[in-house]
Image: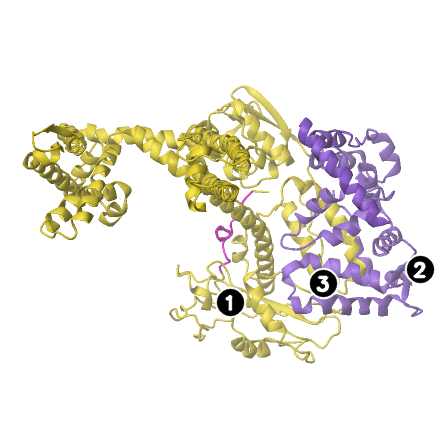
Amino acid sequence: MATGVAAWLPFARAAAIGWMPVANCPMPPAPREHSKKQDELIILNVSGRRFQTWRTTLDRYPDTLLGSTEKEFFYNEETKEYFFDRDPDAFRSVLNFYRTGKLHYPRYECISAFDEELAFFGIIPEIIGDCCYEEYKDRKRENAERLMDDQEENKDSKLPNMNFRETMWRAFENPHTSTMALVFYYVTGFFIAVSVITNVVETVPCGSTPNQKDVPCGERYTVAFFCMDTACVMIFTVEYLLRLFAAPSRYRFMRSVMSIIDVVAILPYYIGLVMTNNEDVSGAFVTLRVFRVFRIFKFSRHSQGLRILGYTLKSCASELGFLLFSLTMAIIIFATVMFYAEKGSSSSKFTSIPASFWYTIVTMTTLGYGDMVPKTIAGKIFGSICSLSGVLVIALPVPVIVSNFSRIYHQNQRADKRRAQKVQKARLARIRIAKKGSSNAYLQSKRNGLLNELLDLTGSEEEEQHMNKTSSLLESQHHHLLHCLEKTTAHEFVDEQLFEQNCVEGAQFSRSPSLSSQEGFTGTCCTRRSRKRIPLPNASLSTTHTHTHTQGLQELSAIHIQCGDQPSLSTSSRSSLNMKSSERSRINCRGQQITTAVISLPSPTNFPPDGDGHGPANPIPAPPTINTTTSSNIVKVSAL
Amino acid sequence: MSRRRRCKRQLVKFIQHIHQLVTGTLNSDNEDEEQDRTVVRRRRPVDLERLLNQSRFTKRELQILYRGFKSECPSGLVNEDTFKTIYAQFFPGGDVSKYAHFLFSAFDTDQNGIVIFEEFVRGLSVLLRGSAEEKLCWAFNLYDLNKDGHISKEEMLDVMKAIYDIMGKNIPPLLKEEAPRQHVELFFQKMDQNQDGVVTVEEFIDTCQKDENIMKSIGIFENNI
């Protein structure tokens, strides 16, 4: 139930007088107040610092250590105070939580120490107030990352038995783990460098023979270059195959960027091998050689800086894309303008708009090659405007990249915020559960109440001990309030799951004269029940079967009959077909006594499940042993 | 005429824009100054002795009430939104805003949109320690939305719908319209003795005093604190 507003409960109950003249049934009696003890001051001694508060303040959150009887473990008889051997600074936040209902995270506090304190006092951190929640989550994430980093470093040292494949993969990923890996790393690096240099040197003109012009070295020493190329490609191929073999998930490896670069680096060679004979495609063959330059990207495995650069560019891709788009717009505009401005002049180089693109780009980037110049006055005016605006437009990407580069360290925060949103959703879900928990608590207590009455009627005493009257006075008063509301509006609080079925069924009922009002109802009840069986697929906690009997009385157009039920002792979650134990129907309230006839039905007939294909109902234990739904099923979170 | 005025206004705005473009002032600076001049509400401190005289609570009860009140609203002023939030926490899953609004009006006796502790205690004093007639009067005041001394069917329907709204999803939507209406019909049949379509204070109190259930129910919240 809501916490700090427990103080307002008397007000809410008093305001319920507003319902009284409207209601047509007598209200249930108010819960008796137990011993009316005065509110007393409790002394909490935390490592020598004494905190004092009212007992009722602590009682606001009954499922924490301080709010329940668990604190009695720490009671010190001689000094009549509760002694806790914990950090008094952190305890301040804990106690403020009780006082104000909001949990704050102090910034100076270490996150794990704070978590420990919260865990000790039984408070879940998710209820930290919005003001401090972000900070808390950030610190927690940083801490987790740091721990993970530490763990990774430690992980390298301890290797339980890893098989050959895993060893190889680790060797590839972290070269400094073993000497072999380091050797392999340097060898591949060397060969990448060799291959790149070979490609470059191939094209250098190497000295001329008298009768010919300069020939590039590649054509002069064809065999040597070919051998070098073959060697490099063989090494790369072997490396790629080894990596492929060692990868834990081959499919993911093949999709990764590095492996694509590897493939692109070695493929031209093999294609060249296959296609050397054919003369027609030699042009394409030459083009393929260009791709050999991609081998230089293989260096990114060796260089952290290259990877960061690539990551930066990837991360500012959207900004760069937008800038490119706006640049394209500007280019098109100015090219068009220049084309039409220069159309008049003779021998103008601006032959078409695409031809003017070149001029615009060169001007806007302030290169100014001078191969195309405007000659008309209009052209010169627009040309100057173009170069001025070019300065502005080109200057824009630079700060973007710079800021992204500096932001790249915090880049992962975006991913974490997304994760935090999921946590936020979980948190909201938890708060929703808490809210539902309170209504579930009410339903639970009503069922307990029903069973209480059952026991009173049947006079069995031994079950009473099972009914733990742990609900505090506050809770019982709250439930009494909700009960009054039910009486006023002549509708009941039901489980949310049944709401939809109610909608469906509510339409079908018409009034029928009340028959079974006075005496036994089960006859009709039972026969109708099988018709209106509503199997609930997720009713692991409790299922309430709702019938709607109508009565001929004017004031009540629909009466919900709530049948309490008991889940079977088996752990199957699909125990919805299990039968309920008590049922009662309410009759007309016009001043007559409400007879609660409780009929326990030991039925375990197999109800044909509507769409519920799970196994038949489990046999029920004998009716006299009525086990109530334990409160462990209901999550009462002291949030809110 | 208005067109010309509009044109002129737009021209002035355009010139202002150009001016700002040139001089580079920020728009937002002007707006901030206005917000600083928010009204700061002041209220007198609450006097225990005076409250003791005005209400029927004992000192101890007043202490408990005030502590609870102040802990939830440290400023000591409850506005309607806070009130709705507090009231909503008792009824999860329902929509208490309408009924909370009516309650707020009933407590806010001087109708200034704020409930201070004195008003709060005054209301509670009637509800918890008042005679039956006073309580019924208070309930009448709650139902009489426009405070004209009569409860009309529309007012009652509003109140009834508000009460049913608190139940929220627990009432099937098909019945959501019908049930309050029927309830109101019943209420009027019972209360409106001279069948003139409105219920006056005397009719209300008279009928309620004759009804055992109501009299019994009113008394159940007596010793509450």
Residue at the spot of label 3: A489
Residues in magenta, as a range: A627-638
The image quarter in which residue B63 lies: top right
Q: Which mark is residue B202?
A: 2
- Between the residue at mark 2 and the residue at mark 3, the CA separation in whole angstroms equals 25 Å
Question: Element under label 3?
Answer: helix
Residue A112 vs residue A487, the one in the foreground: A112
Which amino acid type corresponds to the residue marked 2 in the rendered image?
Answer: Glu
Q: Which mark is residue A580?
A: 1
Residue at 13% over, 30% down: A180
- Decide: is A78 above or below A231: above
Residue A99 vs residue A271, the one in the foreground: A271
Residue A439 painted magenta: no
Q: Colour of chain B?
A: purple
Say which of marks 2 and 1 sits in front.
2
Question: Is A477 left, or right, of A396 in this rendering?
Answer: right
Q: Which chain is yellow?
A: A
Question: Is A442 left, or right, of A551 in this rendering?
Answer: left
Residue B58, position as x, y percentages in the image: 81, 36
Residue A162, position as x, y percentages in the image: 17, 39
